[in-house]
Amino acid sequence: MTDDTDLHQETIDQPEVQRHSRIGWAFLIICGILLPTITLVVETLTHMCRDTFFDPIPNPGHWLLIAMVPISNALLVFTPPSLIQQRLKWFGWLNTISLCIALYYTLLFLPLVPLSAMAILFFGMGLLPLSPLLALIATWLIRKGLKRSLGDKADQLPNFWRGIALASVTLLAINVPAIVTRIGVEMAIGESPSLRQSGITLLRAVGSNREMLKLCYADQGRSNGLFDLTLLEADLDQQERIREVFYRVTGTAYFEHKLPIKQSIRDWASNFDEQQGGQMVGGKILGVKLSRSQIDGTIDQRAATAYLEWTMNFKNDTHQLQEGRGQIVLPPGAVVSRVNLWINGEAKEAAFGGRGQVRQAYEKIVRQQRDPLLVTSAGPDRVQFQLFPIPTDGQEMTIRIGMSVPLQVMNQQSAQLQLPALLDRNFELPTQLRHAISLQSDSALMHSTVFQQRASSNTAYHIEGALPDEQLGRRASLVTIAQQQGTSPAWQLDTLAKPAAVVIQRMTQTPAWRPKRVALVIDGSAAMKTSARQLDQAMRNLPADLEWQVVVAGDQVPKLQPLKPVDGHTLATILKQVDFSGGQDNLPALIAAWDWVAQSERGAVVWLHGTQSITLTQPDNFQHQMRQGHGDIRLYSLQMVAGSNRLLTALDGIATLHPIPRLDTPQADLNRLLQSWLPGTQAYTLNRERVMADVVDQSALSTPSEHLVRLWASDEIHRLSQSRQAGAYQTAATTAQRYQLVTAVSSAVVLETRQQYDEAGLEPVSPGTVPTVPEPETWVLIIVVISVLTWQARRLRKDPY
């Protein structure tokens, strides 16, 4: 009897929420627990709402709040009544906050209710958008049942409006980064310059880079909810301007970052490459890597030339066809003279042609998912390569880029060769990757400890080594060659000239070019912060008898600050005061510096800069100004941070642009330039000219060189491209095609079939006309043969009968 009485009493005291009818019980379980749980899981995996309407789960905080609703309902339904009585306030707050969250998402999804009702009839999926409304009803019923069961104690439950306030504050706090970021972006793309700068400043201070990155993508920049539903919706068509804002704020391009939101399981493009087939290197593609790298070369000290071939293997571990893209910084003055792509195990030669014609052919084949390789100029002493498609699932693709290189003559006793290096790339470099180096020379080589001398005959030198990527193009990869021939001219017969001609190269010693005015343009981007402040020592060696100017490319309008007399301490102080931040547009500072320098008959702008992967201002007027400038005005460029620079690429081919030779650290390279401006400094230069073969006594010249004609042609193409004469540009492009060179006016492409070449109007070069790197034994034999032929030519000239 006692047991029956206790059981009856427990039934009376049991909360009302646990004594519903079977239908009510099923409604609470299905709509209050299961349906919101299923909706949360489906949206997390498929992002159906995000991809179609708006993003209801923009960050982990929203996910936790949504999950709180079914968890709270499950606890109140299944927790023993005695425990609820003991923790009444805790469970009450849990229910109140969950009720407010359900109300928030009900209002958010309210515009979709009519569509959802139709979707239930036709597709059965309409229950998902109705989930917040149904969960709100279920949560409210649970609250009502809880209040009825408590009777007089119902007033102990947290006040509903307090719950609304707490939930609203929580939601607002979670959305603050998105709200502030969207407001800042709206300001940054405004019409007023002051408003734009205020927006940039706000975003740098408190903006969310992740939210900005979402706005850079049309399918991910949708509203996060009621708090920012009306913000920026009208400006999403200005996506390019938003992407510029992202660069101005962060100093990096949007495509250099991973997608801000993981792709859904139904998206095929989980590793989508937005820049495929385009002209920018773009961001890294996970799963595509450089698996092998080999640089082979021969050095001819008598002609002060070298030929290098860089062979690279690319591996694609993804399940999608991918494009590999990268930029190579060439040795100073080098020109690409051979391009190969391995197709079906055979090295295919490239066709050379005008930039537009070649790119059009490449892009057409990319759309057809076939095998092209494109190499184009990307600025002074740099080229960009693109290859597609790299086969899927671990297969490899092999390319080779050959370059004719003039040595950097230091004096009559020595010259230097700097190896090429990767400047920018969209593929990965494994940590264990080493660039294998093999160089052959007809003269003794001085090199760093990373190279080892290989045993060879007395007539040839051979060194080998393996460098990590961070050492390639640095001091470790610099090779010094002992000069033995002094100023003896070198020559090469130009077999393409009609009538026959000879290219002659002479080394001359003249007083170094010296400006009267110098303007230092310092890139104020964030990436330059460390590099620029390492230049103090170079700045202390400035020639004090020149007029100086310092212009900082920053957020403000460039200001001219004449420094005369100049001293290193003053410049060091200015560098310390520069607020390196975000990504800066260097063009206004370059224009201001150029205008000041151009007031002198001989001046120089020294541009110390980092990367600029986004074009912020079109440089058309500055290009025209540089080409039409009066007097002897030069722009010296020194890039101190690895990566692409779109502004520098746009200035490619302009005669007044002089890249500072990259032989050592940026500080040492800059110091070498500044030291050359000291009074009395002498410069050694290599001058190449082409003359008729019948007017030169070839026996009086030194041993012929294989690459002098190509280097002369590169100089001639550069000269023609600057000429204002009618047809000069076309003549430059034709010359580049004839001599098979990649220049500012020409490119190279490897296609898969003869039909593709015919459709593009291109002709692949004959294998017998391209330079090669011979094996060491062949190299020795070539030296012997050339020596015999030279001796015989001189003998015949002295005694032709």
Image (cartoon, rainbow, N blue to C red):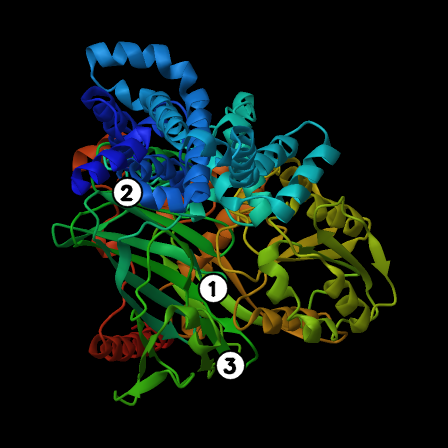
Q: Secondary structure at mark 3?
A: strand
**Above or below — where is 652 with respect to 414?**
above
Residue for point 33% across, 12% down: 115
Tell me if 53 is positioned left or right of 412 in this view: left
Q: Residue at x 70, y 43 (%)?
A: 588
Mark 2 to mark 3 CA distance (whole Å): 90 Å
What is the residue that sits farthest to the left in this orientation? 344
Viewer-nearest of discs 1 and 2 = 2
Amino acid marked by disc 3: Ser
Quadrant of the frame with the C terminus: bottom left
Q: Which residue is mark 2?
A: 80
Along the viewing direction, whichever of 204 and 622 lies nearer the viewer = 204
Please give left or right for residue 528 compared with residue 115 in the image: right
Residue 504: assigned label: 1
**Which x, y percent locates residue 368?**
22, 32
Residue 388, given in percent of the width and then of the height, sits at 26, 44
Check if mark 2's residue and mark 3's residue have beta carbons within 8 Å. no
Residue marked by disc 3: 414
| Residue visible at 52% across and 23% down in the picture | 233
The residue closer to the viewer here, 659 or 527, is 527
Which quarter of the picture shows residue 678? bottom right
Amino acid type of the residue tagged 2 in the rendering: Pro
Tell me the amino acid under the disc marked 1: Ile
Q: Label for residue 256?
A: none
**Extreme residue in the right direction:** 565
Name which residue lies at 55% across and 29% down. Answer: 161
Can you say which quadrant of the picture contains the N terminus?
A: top left
